[in-house]
Structure formats: C-alpha cells, structure tokens
Image: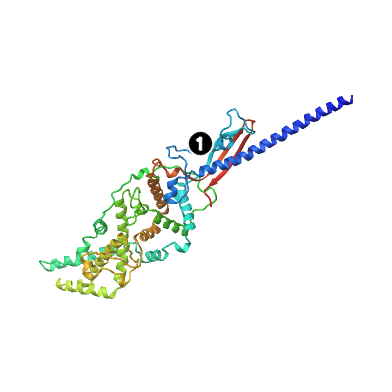
Amino acid sequence: MKKGEITVFLSLMMTVMVGVLFQVIEAARTNGVRFMTECAADMALQSVLAEYNREMLNQYDLFFVDSAYGSSYETNTPLEGHLTDYLNENLGPGEGAPGVFKDFYDASCESVVVSETCKASDMLGDVVERYAVDYMLDLYELDEIPFFSNERSVIEQKGLLGNKFEEEKAKNKERIARYRKKGKKKYKHFSIDNPADAVFDQMDPGIVLGKVTGSDGISAKKIAGTEYVSSREYDEGDGFLHGENAATDVEDMIFQRYLAERCGNYVTRKSNSGLDYELEYVLFGKDSDRDNLDSAVTRLLLIRSTANLLYLSCDSRRCAEAEALAYTVAAVCLLPELGKILKWSIILAWSYSEAVNDIRILLSGGKVALIKTDEQWKLGLMEGLRMKTPGGNNASGLSYRDYLQMLMLFVNKEERNMRFLDIMEMDVRRASGNDLFRIDRCIHDLEAVITVKTGWGHHIRIERLVGYQK
C-alpha cells in the first residue's frame, strides 16, 4: 500500500515538474528568439549600411546607401529585400545544416518595412549640406577655412554687385552725345574723337570671353537639365531622424568651401565630369559650360570694373594722366568744357580694360586683389585705351575659385544646394554600374520595422533606427 502511494505521488510530482520544465524551456525560447532577433536585426542593418555607394564616398566623402542598388526601382523594395536576406542568413541554422534540420528557434523573417528614411534630396539639399559640413569640421580647424567676411563687407558697402559702373557709363555717354549734337549745330563738319570709344565698342561679355580664355578654348559640354533632380519631380524622405539641425550661417560658409573643393571650375577641372565648369553651374544653373562661364565672366567683370573705377577715381597720379589727355582732345574739338566729361569717359574705359585684364589673370590661374593698391594696377593709360591685356599676376589676392566662392555668398541657398545635387547625379552616373543613379534614392539614415516568426508560433516585432552617425 505504501509503495503505491509513493508511485502516485511521484507521478503527480513528475507531471508538475515536467510542466514547469516546459514552461522554463518555452520562456527561454521566447527570450532567446527576441535576443537573437535583435542581434540579427542589428547585424542586418549594419550590413546594409556597409553597402554605401562607393562613388559617393570616393568623389564626395559622404556615406549614402543607394536604396535602388543601381536599378530603376522607385521604392525601397530592393533595400527591404537585402535586409530580409541578411536577416534570414543570421536567423537560420547556418550553412551546411541538413535540409530537414530544425533548430531550437526555427526563426525566419516574416516582414521588413523601411518606415522612415533620411534622403540626400530632403529639405532642398539641407541633408547633404549638414553631413558635408560635419566632414569639413572633422578635416579642418575653423581658422583654416576662409570665410571671406571682410570681402563680403567690402562688396556690400561699396556696391560692387550693383549697377554703379553701368550707370556712370550711361550718364557719360548721354553727356557726350549732347555735346556732339551741339557741335554739329555750330560747325558743318564736327566730330569728337573720344579716346575711350575703342573700349566702349568692345564692352560686351561675349567679346571679352573670347579675349580672356586660354588656348584650349571653352568646353562645349551640355546637359539636359530636366534629367536632374533640381528640375524634375523627386522622392522625398522624412528629413533628419537623429535630431540634427540645418546648417547655421557660419556652417553654410563652411559648405561653400566644400563646394569649391569638390566641384571643378574653368581653372581646375574635375576629371570625368558631366560638365567641366561645375562650380559655375552651381552658381548660375545654365545647361552648358559656355553659358555658365559667360555668366561668371559677366558677374566678375561687374565686380572688377566697379572696384577698379572706385580705386582709379581716387588715384591722383592716374587721374592727372586722364585729365591731360581729355583736355587735349577737348581743345582740338574747340570745346574746352568737354574736358571734364572726357576725363571721366577715359577713367571708365581704363577701369574696364583693367577689369578685362583682371579676368585674364584669374582664368590663367593667377590672383587679383578685391581692392587694388598702386603696385597691383597693371595697365598704363594707353594700354587701357587700346584694350591691350597682357595678363600678369600678383603675389597676393584672390584666385578665380575664391571669387566664385565669394559669389556664393549672394546666391539663393536652396537653388545652390539643388544644383549641387545635380552635379552629384551627373558625375556618379558616369561611373561604372551607376547609369540609373538618382540622388533622391540615396539614404543616410533609416528606421526599419522588422517582424520575425518562429516555427513555435512566436512573432517578434522590433523597430530600429540606424545611420551613419559619429
């Protein structure tokens, strides 16, 4: 009787113990599969981040994943597919396991959804600017980056981007026209041989462009602007996902230096590029190298002509030379009162010729100071009136690239950034395997919702936010 009682007791105890044991095993399985899912998800996401576009890194030192992987997909399907593959590899029993093998978890990926993304095209280029600035701050100290703050103040205070030179030229032309009309009424055969006319007749940016460009001529490259992100409809993500902010004013000037370094220009061209004059495109957005260079030369002529006029009008020695010639011509015309007007006409022409010579110096790789000194002035009076521009150089001053970087201080930030995204697209597409590259498919950060199922009925759902953070 006692033996039977013990047997029943042990049977009951074993039932309870086995139930507890299975509960412990199931709890271990549940916790284990969650931990394994988290590890597998982290490895899968890091594996995807390791698939950054090599050309974006090589050319721009920026990390972005092409979510289309070189295909024409306009969704995140290829990216989600890669994540699913990596998850299944990390969740499965491993290579070489028998086909009928069923491990302790029997886990597999049920679904992957990329719910949020931070794309290069987000916020009108602010995303690319933010991470480019971070790169520059890692590479340089602040005092190593030129901000051109003093030059900007000079340009604004002296109105070098205004119409002062053109206005003065128009006023002078009108005054001389009145005297010509007056002389013709008084004398049958009358003309004013204005020494400045030879220069005024050539005051056309197209003429100047032909005079100042080098022996290799001007690039004939053109693009179809509608193919690129600034002129087409493009995909947008969700902006910054890690709490970053758009660049401050100081950081924006750091980005301008980044643009100057990464983009080719007339003097320093980038190999295998869609356009030779990329920095000029960022500034002016024309579809051809010629048009962009023409716009750059026109803008620089405006700055240099006005700056030279302001300097020359205060140079007593050179003003005396101009005055002597002007009053000699006025005496010949029997209109001595014309001398003052002709003097100003000569000064205008001299300033412009010096500006043309400045552009020649800049486009040949030399430097020109924003506001010149007596030693930095290149042309004599007769050279200026004959528009002889031999070029030359200065030991100090600003290079062509510096002038273009300065001009970026006065362009619309959003237009500038979107044009730079165009440059990125056209240059990356020229690399092998990137024919279908689009900047609006490039992801810097992403949030993924991952669901894993097991053969034991478990469903584990986790969210992960990852990216190329410091």
Q: Quadrant of the N terminus?
A: top right
Asked which quadrant contains residue 265, the reply is: bottom left
Judge whether residue 320 can be spotted in this image.
yes
- Residue wearing tag 1: 81
Outermost left residue: 188
Residue 272 percent location from the top left of the image: 35, 48
Residue 340 percent location from the top left of the image: 23, 72
Asked which quadrant contains residue 438, the reply is: top left
Residue 303 percent location from the top left of the image: 32, 62
Q: Amino acid at mark 1?
A: Gly
Front-most of residues 352 and 85:
85
Q: Is residue 350 above or below residue 208?
A: below
Residue 396 percent location from the top left of the image: 35, 67
Q: Is residue 5 above or below residue 224?
A: above
Front-most of residues 250 and 38:
38
Outermost right residue: 1
Q: Is residue 192 above or below residue 235?
A: below
**In the figure, is residue 419 to the left or right of 358?**
right
Judge whether residue 164 can be spotted in this image.
no
Dot 1 crowding, Cα within 10 Å, few <14, some 14–19, many 20+: some
Look at the numbered disc 1 and give the secondary structure of its residue.
helix
Front-most of residues 41 and 286:
41
